[in-house]
C-alpha cells in the first residue's frame, strides 16, 4: 500500500472519529407503544390480541436494542474524542506551528503564510478548526513515521 493511500485512510479515519460524537448525540425517537385497551362489551378475537402483544414485545425489544447500541456508540465516541486532540491542545499546537486565529465572516479560522516553491512570495492559507486538527494530527503522524524510519543513512553526519 502506498503512503498516499495510507495517509488518505488515516485522514478519513480521523474525520470519522471527529464526526462520531456528533452523530451519537442525536436524539433517539421513542418507541411507539400501543394505547392501553379498555375493556369492551363486544367479544374480541384472542388471536388478534396475542399477535398485538407479541408485536408490542418485539417493538420494545427492538427499541431497547437500538437504545443500547446508541449508548455504546456514544461511549465509544467519548473514548475516541478523549484520545483525539481537544480544542485547547489544537490552538496551542497551531500557534507553535505558525497558525494564527482570525475571524472571517463570523467564523474563527486559522491562517498562516506558506512560502511558494520557486518564488519569493508567500501564499496565505486559512483552514477551519476541524481541518486544522486534521492537519496537526497528520503532521504528528508524519513526524513519528520519520522518527521510526530514520533518515536511511543519508543524514549528513559522519
Image (tube, helix red, strand yellow):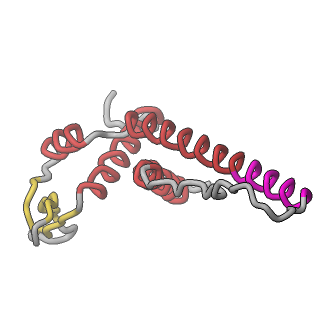
Residue 33 or residue 10, whichever sits in front: 33
* Residue at 75% across, 60% down: 40
* Residue at 67% across, 45% down: 65
Residue 25 or residue 55, whichever sits in front: 55
In the figure, 14 relative to 74: above or below? below
**Would residue 122 be found to the left or right of residue 133 on screen?**
left
Can residue 92 be seen in the rendering of this structure?
yes
Q: Quadrant of residue 110?
A: bottom left
Residue 48 included in the magenta stretch of the image: yes
Residue 128 or residue 78, whichever sits in front: 78
Can residue 154 be seen in the rendering of this structure?
no
Quadrant location of the N terminus? bottom right
* Residue at 31% across, 53% down: 135
In the figure, 27 relative to 153: above or below? below
Please provide percent x and percent y for residue 15.
43, 55
Residue segment shown in magenta: 46-59
Residue 156 included in the magenta stretch of the image: no
- Disc tally is 0
Amino acid at each position: 500500500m502506498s503512503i498516499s493511500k495510507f495517509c488518505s485512510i488515516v485522514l478519513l479515519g480521523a474525520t470519522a472519529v471527529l464526526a462520531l460524537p456528533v452523530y451519537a448525540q442525536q436524539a433517539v425517537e421513542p418507541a411507539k407503544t400501543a394505547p392501553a385497551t379498555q375493556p369492551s362489551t363486544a367479544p374480541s378475537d384472542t388471536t388478534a390480541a396475542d399477535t398485538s402483544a407479541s408485536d408490542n414485545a418485539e417493538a420494545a425489544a427492538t427499541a431497547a436494542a437500538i437504545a443500547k447500541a446508541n449508548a455504546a456508540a456514544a461511549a465509544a465516541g467519548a473514548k475516541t474524542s478523549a484520545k483525539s486532540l481537544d480544542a485547547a491542545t489544537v490552538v496551542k499546537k497551531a500557534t507553535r506551528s505558525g497558525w494564527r486565529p482570525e475571524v472571517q465572516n463570523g467564523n474563527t479560522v486559522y491562517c498562516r503564510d506558506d512560502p511558494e516553491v520557486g518564488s519569493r512570495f508567500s501564499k496565505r492559507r486559512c483552514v477551519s478548526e476541524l481541518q486544522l486538527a486534521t492537519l496537526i494530527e497528520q503532521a504528528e503522524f508524519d513526524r513519528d513515521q520519520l522518527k521510526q524510519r530514520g533518515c536511511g543513512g543519508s543524514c549528513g553526519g559522519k
